[in-house]
Amino acid sequence: MDKKNALRAGALAAGTTLMMLLMSSPALALNRDDGDDPGTGLSVVETLGLYVVAPIALFVVIAALVMIGDKSHKKKDTTSSNLRTKADAKA
């Protein structure tokens, strides 16, 4: 790709991004829609709990369940990775 095409692609990407940012301006949120009934806002503690603590807790729970399932699988594994051989072989 030559410099001219790269410049065109960059300009197109920048222009598209700028237009999307301008069209989704927060000022448009001031105009209420019919039937719009927003609730009360979240406090800082509620926001952190919902968007930080809850995903981390969910990740920990899922990881713990996977680890528990993996450990129980190793006990029942009868493949060659679980077999032990003696080194006492005499020739």
Image: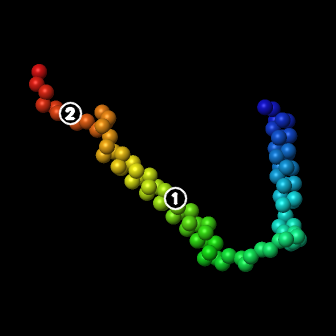
Say which residue label 1 marks: 59
Say which residue label 2 marks: 85
Image color mode: rainbow
Q: What residue type is labelled 1?
A: Phe
- Mark toward the start of the polypeptide (2 vs 1): 1
Residue 89 lies, in percent from the top left, at 13, 27
**Cα separation between marks 2 and 1:** 39 Å
Residue 49 lies, in percent from the top left, at 58, 71
Looking at the image, which residue is at 40% across and 50% down? 69
Question: For this rendering, which residue is in front, 64 or 13?
Answer: 64
The quarter in which the C terminus is drawn is: top left
Q: Which amino acid does label 2 sit on?
A: Thr
Q: What element carries label 2?
A: loop
Q: Is mark 1 on a helix, strand or loop?
A: helix
Q: Residue 23 carries which label?
A: none
Q: How many labels does the image show?
A: 2
The quarter in which the N terminus is drawn is: top right
Question: For this rendering, which residue is in front, 64 or 1?
Answer: 64
Q: Can residue 34 be seen in this view?
A: yes
Looking at the image, which residue is at 87% across and 59% down? 23
Residue 48 image-quadrant placement? bottom right
For this orientation, the residue located farthest to the left is: 90
Q: How crowded is mark 1: few (under 14 residues within 10 Å), some or many (20 or more)?
A: few
- Residue 88 vs 41, above or below: the answer is above
Looking at the image, which residue is at 17% across and 33% down? 86
